[in-house]
Image (cartoon, helix red, strand yellow):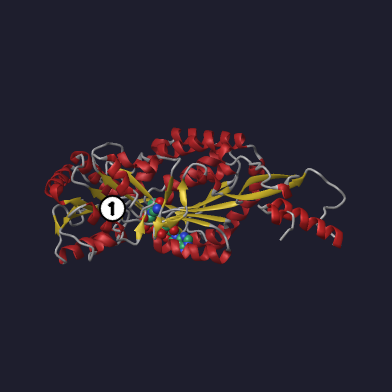
């Protein structure tokens, strides 16, 4: 009998559903089927593949509420957040449906010199046969589909392995691909870490989103197999608030940025640096706003703002960061502890923090906002860059030029100026983690689809004499002529061109 994984609701601990715990052999056989079906998918025109993705987009929209309810049942998100994900994926489908063909169109560079003048050169983008997508539990639908879409449009088959905590909505969404009658090139496998490892062992390209710890394990295995991987990992995003910031916007941005999805976003605001003249005012306003938030889960109502944490492990990390900070002299101005039922943790504003504390250096991934007073922008930049991570950051100031110049000094793959998470929606720009936050990027216009392709050089001769001059046999006459000719076209001064030196 196949073992199953029971999925529980973080909001109340009830059973949300179950999925098979697939063995490495089952994963391997699923990948083999996807591989066998891939050549026919690649052979379709781009427009034909777009046709399937458009039908799939319509299916996602038609099933949006059902998918939202399922997602909510396994994540404990409030309805306002459970419904973020389908629209995001639809935007990705529309973007790559419109631009992808141009991004991976074959290129015909002109010969760069006399030696290749008679050759026709073409650069063709050919997909990896099977792309493996391994995803975490914080955005189970968006993170599974946003990378699958460009990979499918490039002509690859895709296998997704969702987190054991949130496999239900991912599996259901991928079942929609079969429901619309699309070619069998998109599949889902379920299980624990070993099922993910089996994806890495069988796919031709791995797209991983998750922790830095697991990302390193996957990167090592991918290196052993000599397959490429793109690793989107954790973060410790800094928010820099300068004294001339539009204060209410900065405060509202900070509260949403730190607490959205209960702080379980790779790009959450994890630490805030505020210039001294506005520090007191900023903190007071943050505390007031946080006090207005409603925590809980509400089916399809909009009665709550902050949901539950994904599981007990996550709650234990958050509690440890808060407790350690308080032991070391920090103060919690709000929250600081779990709420009564489920894995809810009260939104927590911490002050009197510094970089000796885990809450300022390790990824918390929870509803906390440690705020630190800084003397000036220079100190804020130095502290923001004092991190092993480099995913993204924000800068807040009325002086846009100054904001952008501070942005250029931050060691982070993306920086929003006077905005929160805006870069997640700018599909033409890459979302890349620097330092321990990853290798490679997602989105980024043509990069976001070319990454799922291998480039192939095709060279064909316009002239086809019986043999080329450099082929056998080697003779003195041919050799001398060839060398003189090569000098003539490659040297850049007359004396060397004509062999006078
Ligand atoms: P994990 O790294 O624990 O797990 C991610 C996925 O990898 C899961 O599906 C997991 O399966 C699977 N997995 C575990 N072990 C292996 C293995 N040896 N080989 C292959 N796959 C394996 O991350 P979390 O689920 O805890 O997610 C939270 C993390 O994700 C945070 O650090 C966050 O910052 C990061 N993240 C990064 C984003 C980005 O774009 N940079 C976006 C969102 C999140 P299972 O769960 O079944 O063990």
Disc tally is: 1
Q: Is residue 459 left or right of residue 207?
A: right
Q: Position of residue 383 (x, y in %)?
A: 26, 58
Q: Position of residue 66 (x, y in %)?
A: 40, 38
Quarter where residue 122 is shown: top right
Q: Which structural element holds mark 1?
A: strand
User: In this orientation, does residue 473 appear?
Assistant: no
Quarter where residue 404 is shown: top left
Between residue 453 and residue 24, name the one nearer to us. 453
Quarter of the image with the C terminus is bottom right
Q: Is residue 280 left or right of residue 77?
A: left
Q: Position of residue 494 (x, y in %)?
A: 69, 52
Residue at image point 16% right, 66% down: 328
10 Å crowding of disc 1: few (<14), some (14-19), many (20+): many
Give the residue pinned by disc 1: 238
Q: Where 52 falls versus 380 (above or below)?
A: above
User: In this orientation, does residue 149 appear?
Assistant: yes
Q: Position of residue 305 (x, y in %)?
A: 24, 42
- Some atom of ligand 1 lies within 8 Å of the CB belonging to the residue at label 1: no
Residue at image point 74% right, 58% down: 499
Q: Where 352 falls versus 446 (above or below)?
A: below
Q: Where 136 falls versus 67 (above or below)?
A: below
Residue at image point 64% right, 41% down: 106
């Amino acid at each position: 009998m196949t073992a199953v994984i029971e999925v529980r609701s973080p909001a109340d601990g009830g059973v949300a559903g179950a999925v098979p715990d697939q063995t490495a052999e089952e994963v391997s056989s699923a990948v083999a089927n996807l591989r066998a079906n891939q050549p026919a998918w690649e052979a379709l025109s781009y427009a034909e593949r777009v046709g399937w993705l458009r039908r799939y987009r319509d299916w996602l929209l038609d099933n949006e509420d059902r998918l939202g309810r399922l997602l909510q049942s396994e994540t404990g998100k409030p309805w306002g957040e459970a419904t973020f994900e389908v629209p995001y994926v639809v935007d990705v489908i529309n973007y790559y449906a419109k631009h992808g063909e141009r991004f991976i169109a074959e290129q015909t560079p002109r010969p760069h010199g006399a030696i290749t003048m008679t050759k026709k050169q073409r650069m063709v983008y050919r997909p990896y046969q099977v792309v493996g997508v391994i995803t975490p539990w914080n955005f189970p639908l968006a993170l599974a589909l946003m990378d699958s879409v460009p990979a499918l449009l490039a002509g690859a088959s895709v296998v997704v392995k969702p987190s054991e905590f949130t496999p239900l909505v991912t599996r259901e969404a991928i079942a929609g691909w079969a429901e619309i009658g699309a070619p069998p090139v998109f599949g889902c496998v379920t299980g624990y870490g070993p099922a993910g490892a089996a994806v890495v062992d069988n796919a031709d390209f791995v797209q991983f989103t998750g922790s830095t710890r697991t990302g390193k394990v996957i990167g090592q295995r991918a290196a052993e197999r000599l397959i490429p991987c793109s690793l989107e990992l954790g973060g410790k995003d800094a928010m820099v608030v300068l004294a001339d910031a539009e204060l209410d916007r900065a405060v509202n941005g900070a509260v949403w940025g730190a607490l959205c999805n209960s702080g379980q976003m790779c790009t959450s605001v994890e630490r805030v640096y505020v210039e001294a003249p506005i520090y007191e005012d900023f903190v007071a306003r943050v505390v007031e706003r946080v006090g207005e938030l409603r925590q809980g889960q509400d089916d399809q109502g909009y009665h709550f703002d902050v949901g539950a944490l994904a599981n007990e492990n996550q709650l234990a990390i958050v509690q440890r960061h808060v407790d350690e900070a308080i032991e070391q002299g920090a103060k919690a101005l709000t929250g600081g502890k779990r709420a009564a039922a489920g894995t809810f943790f009260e939104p927590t504003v911490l002050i009197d923090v510094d970089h000796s504390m885990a809450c300022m250096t390790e990824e918390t991934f929870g509803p906390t906002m440690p705020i630190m007073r800084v003397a000036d922008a220079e100190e804020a930049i130095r502290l923001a860059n004092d991190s092993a991570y480099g995913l993204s950051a924000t800068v807040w100031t009325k002086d846009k030029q100054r904001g952008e110049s501070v942005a250029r000094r931050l060691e982070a793959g993306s920086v929003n100026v006077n905005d929160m998470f805006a870069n997640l929606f700018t599909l033409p720009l890459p979302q890349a983690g620097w330092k321990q936050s990853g290798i490679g990027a997602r989105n980024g216009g043509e990069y976001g689809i070319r990454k799922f392709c291998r480039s192939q050089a095709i060279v064909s001769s316009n002239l086809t004499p019986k043999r080329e001059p450099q082929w056998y046999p080697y003779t003195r006459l041919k050799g001398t002529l060839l060398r003189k000719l090569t000098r003539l076209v490659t040297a850049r001064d007359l004396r060397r061109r004509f062999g006078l030196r």
